[in-house]
Amino acid sequence: MKRRFLLKAASAFTLFPGMFAQAAAGVRQLASRVRPNDAAWPSAEKWAGLRQQVGGRLAKLDSPFKRGAAAGFLKNTFELGDQPALTQTSGWIDAWTSRPSAYMVAAQNTQDVVAAVNFARENRLRLAIKGGGHSYQGTSAAPDSLLIWTRHMNSVQVHDSFVPQGCSVAAQPAVSLGAGAMWIDAYDAVTTRAHRYVQGGGCTTVGVAGLIQSGGFGSFSKKYGTAAAGLLEAEVVTADGEVRIANACTNPELFWALKGGGGGGFGVVTRLTLRTRELPESFGGVFFSIKANTDAAYRALVTEMLAFYQRVLFNPSWGEQIGFHPGNYVSVNMVFQGMSKEQARQTWQPMLDWIAAHEDVSIERPFACVALPAQHFWDAAFLKQYAAEFIVADPRPDAPPHHILWKGDLEQAGWYIHGYRSAWMPAALLAPEQQASLVDAIFRTTRIWSVGFHFNKGLAGAPAAEIEAARETATNPAVLNAFALAIIAGGGGPQFPGMPGLKHEPAKAREDGQKIHQAMDELLTVAPNAGSYVSESDYFLKQWQSAFWGPNYARLAKVKRQYDPDGLFFTRHGAGTENWSDDGFHQLSGESA
């Protein structure tokens, strides 16, 4: 704010004190949460009472680095997730930094969660919820808060037939998962051992509950839709401390809100039940990169790649991403389902022939095509034997043998975000008459930064039944007509406060962030009103209500008022949080959306 404006404001207050007093009364602070130094902070006796209620599973939290811990565990996302005082993302420049809660309840059952929710409500505490801890927006961390840590609520039960409570519908195969389960736990039980498929996330260490509540995309979402659309039932503890079942027949509006309405905004989900599907015969991938020697050749390459995608890959068989980069190169990291290795290779042959016919374009990273029986796609023992170069296993001696991570996701361990923007790109841009404009936008974007087109995160081209199922979720309907989610992002190594060897370069981080914004602005010239995915988006987004949820937002805000009228469950830029301070400690108005 400029100094001149401040001087004018001070002068006006001197002249019209009564007017300003009335205005202040109109926007009076209606509620605030207490911090450890406040007189109203719970006494030691009260904390002891909570500890007794939760079977001793209450602890004060402090950074492990304050206790002299080495930073070695930052190379293991499983071990990092086992640190309740840390998060998988260490922060975002000028936005948030991962700092521990004051206290933590290490919940092992639903009653532990009930006790923590009641204690937070009765004592006006800021509440935080952490499962996998992968939130880029920092929603699973909050200084001076009480943390409900659900990591140990990780049960997995596969059902041959499941009927949601209170519903008169046909039974179907399903899987029930505790809130702390990771997707590798789900895939091991459902795919490796039960030989079925459940739509979940691509990164295996992401928490099941957080992904479902945010919408949720996996590598094969172009075939199987969003993870949220597969939700059949949830058990959730709401702000009044009640344990509720939410499904299409019981608490249906709450059920709808949990399907993409934002993680941790409507209650603490303690258990989820998801539908499972028949497995295809195979899963596989295609990987290579291409370099153009001139700007003209790069334009031609981008043009051909987009046309090739529209003609050949724009269907349920293909997912994941193609990246367009500065330096005039293109990276291909695609997955497929239901095809043999030879069929996948033949699919790409026209593109390979085009590259071979153009002397100013060449393959940099050799073309690779792999396929394997679908039941082994997350099979740790199989992958360690036949595809060890693609995975990283949790090396700790007591680690569950199925805990593996895709090697490419290891870079997310503790990463510090410099900038992150996403946009659902309308399928209309793939029409022949629109492709030239899209090519120009991509070319201008790559003069500044890389852009990845995540085709599995747009449902245009998916089966009609999956599009309709996603329509019944809270996710922005823009996803239904998007051929991809375009992501432009960048970051650096871990920046946890107090960690050994910490090297902070804010100037570089801010410069990167500025370039990321400029690059996305160039891309959005062809999609100026594109929505954004709540889990992968800009922390500083202004019109977040319409970007995240579009026409669904008014309904979401109504559900929030019904089940959490006092805003106990706060996540920045979550439904109904317009009139709360960014840290969730102060309510500034009684009006809600």
Image (cartoon, rainbow, N blue to C red):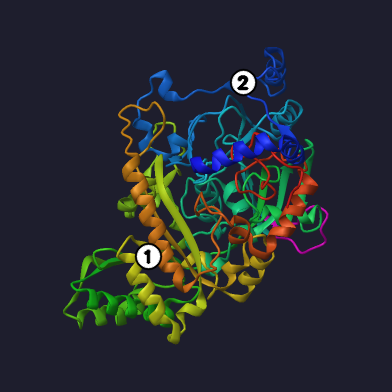
Q: How would you rate the neighbour count of disc 2 (Cα within 10 Å): few for under 14, some for 14-19, many for 20 or more?
A: few
Magenta segment includes 171: yes
Amino acid type at mark 1? Gly
Q: Residue at x 69, y 33 (%)?
A: 113
Q: CA distance from mark 1 to mark 2?
A: 51 Å
From where the camera sits, is residue 287 visible? no
Q: Is residue 47 above or below residue 443?
A: above
Q: Is residue 53 above or below residue 236?
A: above
Query: In the rendered structure, which disc, 1 or 2, sits on the residue that comes first in sequence?
Result: 2
Q: How would you rate the neighbour count of disc 1 (Cα within 10 Å): few for under 14, some for 14-19, many for 20 or more?
A: many
Q: Nearer the viewer, residue 359 or 537?
A: 537
- Residue furthest left as drawn: 359
The secondary structure that dominates the magenta segment is: loop
- Residue furthest front as drawn: 15
Q: Is residue 162 above or below residue 205?
A: below
Determine whether, in the image, residue 53 is placed left or right of residue 76: right
Determine which of the numbered discs, if any, sits on residue 5 in the image: none
Q: Which residue is mark 1?
A: 285
Give coordinates of residue 345: x percent, y percent: 33, 75
Regarding mark 1 in the picture, which secondary structure is present there? strand
Give coordinates of residue 54: x percent, y percent: 69, 24
Regarding mark 2 in the picture, which secondary structure is present there? loop
Give coordinates of residue 558: x percent, y percent: 77, 54
Q: Is residue 558 above or below residue 310?
A: above
Q: Which residues are magenta?
A: 160-172
Determine which of the numbered discs, if any, sits on residue 36 in the image: 2
